[in-house]
Amino acid sequence: MALSSDQQAELQLQLQQAVQACNERCLYFAAKWTAELLNSLETTSNDPDTSDTEIDEDDVQSPVQPTNHDRKEARLEAKELPRYLMAKSFFDCREFDRCAAVFLPTQVPHSTPSHQPLSPSRIQIQGTPGKHRRNPSSFSATSKAPKVQAPPLPKHLSQKSLFIALYARYLSGEKRKNEDSETILGPHDGPATANKEVSGIGAILEEYFNARGGLEDMTNSQGWLDYLYGIILIKSKSELLAKQWLLRSVNINPFNWSAWLELASLVESADELQQMGQHLPRNVMAFFFHIHCSQELFLQEPEVYNTIAQMQAIFPRSPFLQQQKALLLYHARDHATAIDIFDNLIRTQPHRLDGMEIYSNLLYVLDNRPKLATLAAMATDTDKFRPETNCILGNYYSLIAEHEKAVLHFRRALALDRNFQAAWTLMGHEYIELKNTQAAIESYRRAVDTNRKDYRAWYGLGQGYEMLECHSYSLFYYQRAASLCGGDPKMWAAVGNAYSKCGKITNAIQAFKRALIVGSQMEAAATASSFGTSNSDPLAHAVGGALDPQVLYDIALLYEKESNWDEAAAYMELCLAQEEGPEEGDEGMGVTQITSRARLWLARWSYSCGEWQRTMELANELCQDGVEVEEAKSLVKDVRARMNLEEVDGEGGGS
């Protein structure tokens, strides 16, 4: 995808205006992201080697002024400028209540939020792609729901001033909520402690938009208040309605990356993403949104990589695009290439910590202690009070088996940002290691509350309940993990194990076979059949590839429970065959404890079938393996005695 010079100049101007507009509204993360994108454009003006003598005075640009087509809003902003500058100064000093009071002297009441959602009774809701979430009743208006009376807004207040005042009030509520929550995983930490400002802010915005035509009328909106209303609706569990307001926000103002991220948090499947694409604006931001959602949904279609390549042609130096590609490769288990991209990103952006906790996860999985130690030292030198830094340190201490120190750093990360989802998941892993099951389960619950697409947290919940021997619960959570990351054989093996412990042998066998298919990295068509619905044997598609002997052994034992001895023997033979390569000349995995157990089972099976020669071969091999040697010797002795007895009987019969 190549842009003409005019298109590139227009895009550059739009990004410059977006950075300034986000900064004016104190959306600093969105401003930082957009500024990175702006400086990754392939333009000659970004060349750092250009000397001062080469700059023409005509090329010097004046400060960018965001375009405001609404003359009324422009006049209001000009009139409010002194008060706005004071409010923004208060906001920058984190005096959120003082900031809000500049434009809203009558403060939003600090009311206790209702469990009922906001009820936009006069807003016409159009159907958009999606499905009901946790509380289906929250998407319908109800006259019985208690409503917070919105205080009257000052007349002639610009949208920018209203946004910064309400956003400050929202952050004040978040700050107060964190203070009331006290310690991490303490008695007051969790959903019981909520942002008490949500109901009041929602009432103001509902009244504001109802007076301007509701959801349908987009003519008088700049998109910023729509974004804030979307956040409030998410907090109120009205997620279907929140999706509509966020879609409206990104269509009116497509260069607010924070709105795209909130919208992405509501996308839970590839089908939902595809349907939502019909309602998105046609510009580069929609491509970035698609890349981000695809990475979060663990999609590996060529289209995703093609989209990244197209965007990199426009933004060749974008650290965000490099990071997204590295994460996609990480999920695809192309670890070597992912590490190369992360290393290059660190060389070019040595002080950029965004997403580096995921790089530390990769180094932890690969047991690369030297690189992880280097990354931890670099992050600590950059900023030791960042959640990412503490997660990196936590992974390092976990790798060297100092799990108490790892928990300490994950708790520090959460003290800095309670919504930092990776820290909740990683802390849950550490509590599993420490055998603190209840704390692990609570950590994983907080992780999935923050991000329902984190399959590792769902898997961790399954592990926790499995340790408590609540197998029905563990099955449910393992199934959620497998539905989110169907390309990981570990997920399907866990589902199979949970089914087995619930006594559902047929379902367990199907899940284990699915694990074999995924593990052998066969074509997607081979794994497309829905779990438990295919009558054909999915293992037939995996023949010829390396198979997991543990899974084969587990399948054989399940067939044994059903007294299907022929199938059990066949899978034990397959398990034993993994010692050798699938083809002549290929190197297998050699003798393992699992293959030796399969050999012992087959020896017993051959003995029960009277196949003395086969039994002798397997028992002698067991003696060489050094596993179950005593039983193997006993089998050899017994078989020899029987063979000698048969020889004696044969001689007697002949005489």
Image (cartoon, rainbow, N blue to C red):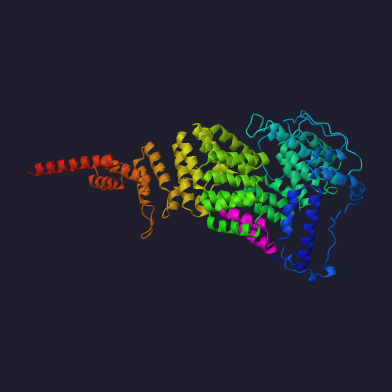
Number of residue marks: 0
> Residue visible at 79% across and 50% down?
23
Question: In this view of the protein, which residue sits in the foreground, 442 or 180?
Answer: 180
The answer to whether 421 is drawn above or below residue 503 in the figure is below
Q: Is residue 429 left or right of residue 104?
A: left
Residue 33 place in picture, x, y as percent = 72, 53
> Residue visible at 91% across and 47% down?
76
Furthest-bottom residue in this view: 54
Quadrant the C terminus occupies: top left
Quadrant the N terminus occupies: bottom right
Question: In this view of the protein, which residue sits in the foreground, 71 or 25?
Answer: 25
Visible in this render: residue 109? Answer: yes
Residue 540 place in picture, x, y as percent = 43, 51
Q: Is residue 308 magenta?
A: yes
Question: In this view of the protein, which residue sits in the foreground, 276 or 416?
Answer: 416
Q: Is residue 636 magenta?
A: no
Q: Which residues are magenta?
A: 302-330
Visible in this render: residue 487? Answer: no
Residue 311 place in picture, x, y as percent = 68, 60
Furthest-left residue in this view: 655
Predominant secondary structure, magenta span: helix
